[in-house]
Amino acid sequence: MNLSELATFYYVAKPEAGFIWLSAYYISALITFFSLLALSLANASKLSQSIEIAIIAFLGISVLPLLIPGAALDGVKSIGYSITRVAGPYYVIVQLGILIPLIGAFLTSGYYFCRTESYAVKRKSQIILIACMPIFISVIAVMLVMQLGYQLNASVILSLMISFTLMILIYTEQKERQFKFMSMIPTTREHQFIKNLARLITDPAIGLEQGRDYIEKEMIREALILMDDNKNKAAAMLGVSRQTLQRKLDKNTSKDTPIGIQTQ
């Protein structure tokens, strides 16, 4: 997609010749947005075959007007520093193909974040929401500006936002990195944990036993998240037996939160 966007700058003086590159850009963008929708839906469980077929079919419907001359794109024109599309009669299908999967990804991730009991799914949903927020804002803003009749090269804005989103999603693909990323976001449990660690070290009012219990509790909790609540795998990760892990879970459940330590 970025290669297609960069290629359009070459055709400022002869915009008609850049039509194929602009079409390729839109097709790549549509594939990206539908991939985000599929990623959001697959967060809690594997996609069923019927959902996969529905996503592919909707993607095909959105791409089809771009393959028919004069349908979605009625031409290309120069705007001085780049080229932009001349909307055809079916350009609205492409717009819906961008908006619907993007909104669907937001709603799906928001639902999983609010309703699921699995913290691993909740965390991944929150990451998707954070990663997609710049795209969502830029897409809405670009569409509003274009509807008002202003001319701009939206591909530059979307390419930057999509690159930002993909960097976050690729970085957080490993569960270990998800904790690191979320610890940088204020109000998250991970961020609060880092703050509590600093307080454990610097606050003389917090005793060694309280600090040890808190760290142990958080290590167990994170191991269960990483191992999808599988206690056998979590115990192996921590180097203890399953019975020991269960005993510590029962002990931590019965204990109150240590004085001066906040959890979310």
Image (cartoon, rainbow, N blue to C red):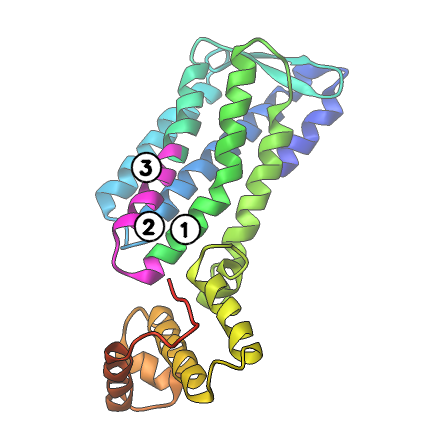
Residue 128 in the figure: left or right of residue 168: left
Q: Earlier in the sequence, mark 3 or mark 1?
A: 3
The magenta segment = 103-121
Q: Is residue 168 above or below residue 137?
A: below
Marks 3,2: beta carbons within 8 A: no
**Where residue 207 sits in the image (x, y, percent)?**
46, 86
Mark number, residue 232: none
**Helix or strand or loop: what does disc 1 sit on?**
helix
Q: Return the residue nearer the eye: 48 or 96.
A: 96
**Where residue 78 sits in the image (x, y, percent)?**
70, 14
The answer to which quarter of the image holds residue 254 is bottom left
Q: Residue at x 49, y 25 (%)?
A: 140
The answer to which quarter of the image holds residue 16 is top right
Can residue 174 be seen? no
Can residue 200 be seen? yes
Residue 3 in the figure: left or right of residue 167: right
Q: Return the residue nearer the eye: 128 or 79.
A: 128
Q: Return the residue nearer the eye: 202 or 99.
A: 202
Say which of marks 3 and 1 sits in front.
Answer: 1
Q: Spatial distance from mark 2 to mark 1, Cα to Cα?
A: 6 Å
**Helix or strand or loop: what does disc 3 sit on?**
helix
Instruction: Give the residue at mark 3.
Output: 55
Quadrant in the picture for the N terminus: top right
Q: Amino acid at mark 3?
A: Ile
Instruction: Give the residue at mark 2.
Output: 113
Q: Residue at x 64, y 30 (%)?
A: 156
Marks 2,1: beta carbons within 8 A: yes
The answer to which quarter of the image holds residue 218 is bottom left
Instruction: Give the residue at mark 1.
Output: 126
Residue 106 in the figure: left or right of residue 87: left
Q: Is residue 143 above or below residue 247?
A: above
